Amino acid sequence: MSFWRSTFARCGLVLAVFLAGLGTCWADPRTSNLWWMPENAVQGGVYIDQLIYFILFLTGGVFVITQIVYIFFIVKYRARKGVPATYTHGNNRLEIIWTAIPTAIFIGLWGYSNHLWWDVLHSTPPANSLQVGVAAYQFGFSFQYPGADGKLGKAEASFVSNDNMFGNDPSDPDAKDNFSSSVLEIPVNRPVHIRLDSKDVIHGFYIPQFRIYQDIVPGRMIDWVWFTPTKIGKFQLACSQLCGSGHYNMKADIEVVSEADFEKWYQEKAKAVQPQPGAKLTSVTETKDQ
Ligand SMILES: [Cu+2]
């Protein structure tokens, strides 16, 4: 009896020290939702959260159980005078069980996250999506909107340069009235389809509240990311790839506004770049050639 009492007392003590230490392990700079996921402000974000919490509780539970068993065995089978050590060569049935269960869990998680990736995140953007070009560079982001015609136009990574950050195809008339912005202004509850390109190195397009993270790779146009913001408010886009000395400050403001406010902002911006009637951007060279 005294053996069990002392064993449990020791296990309890070790566990208490461990849990007390755990409290000091949390060093999160976030100021809200400190303990759990940041606020969810995107359609479909709840599925990502469910998966993350499922994995967290599953692995957390397994961790706690294995630590309890581990500590218990350490105490129970400690070296004692007059008690010879016992040797074991394993148990095949046990080996098969504890290999098969985690394997089945991992295959299930793979299947479910694959479904999330293809059916929720990587699906075709809806036809009414707002098209926005996103150019990343050392050290900032710039955004491009389609202008009055609502078309962003063709773009290719090979066109990306200092003068053409978004890689617009110079021969495509749809791109002529595009306008740019340093803020990602988007309407609430409308799908936003973004086209990402980088001018120099690999950057990361990361918005925790939208549950989006996509690398932006130079030499590639990445056009499969889309999302539907569900909350009006200010958010921050941050670069999540260590991209150079100014990486720590590589960010951009995101403003999710009502459809009416967005329309007003968009019309004002579009009007400012509206080409004059009859005027063409290529008219100078054309006059010279004639
Ligand atoms: Cu960066």
Image (tube, rainbow, N blue to C red):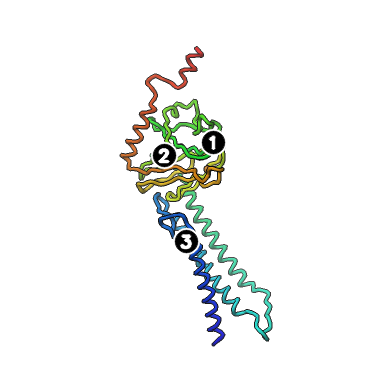
Q: From the image, which quarter does the N terminus lie in?
A: bottom right
Of label 2 and label 3, which has the lower sequence position?
Answer: 3
Badge 2, how many Cα within 10 Å: few under 14, some, many 20+? some
Residue 183 disc label:
2
Q: Secondary structure at mark 3?
A: helix
Could you tell me residue 241's position as x and y percent?
Answer: 54, 46
Of label 2 and label 1, which has the lower sequence position?
Answer: 2
Cβ of mark 1 under 8 Å from ligand 1: the answer is no
Q: Which residue is mark 1?
A: 199
Q: Secondary structure at mark 2?
A: loop
Task: Look at the numbered discs 1 and 3 and tell me whether their residues touch, using CB distance below 8 Å.
Answer: no
Tell me the amino acid under the disc marked 1: Lys
Tell me the amino acid under the disc marked 3: Phe
Q: Which residue is mark 3?
A: 54
Task: Look at the numbered discs 2 and 3 and tell me whether their residues touch, using CB distance below 8 Å.
Answer: no
Q: CA distance from mark 2 to mark 1?
A: 18 Å
Q: Residue at x 59, y 76 (%)?
A: 73
Query: Left or right of 254: which side holds 218?
Result: right
- Mark 1 vs mark 3: in front: 1
Badge 1, how many Cα within 10 Å: few under 14, some, many 20+? many
Q: CA distance from mark 2 to mark 3?
A: 35 Å
Could you tell me residue 196's position as x and y percent?
Answer: 49, 39
Q: Residue at x 35, y 46 (%)?
A: 232
State whether residue 61 is above or below residue 179.
below
Q: Nearer the viewer, residue 129 or 183?
A: 183
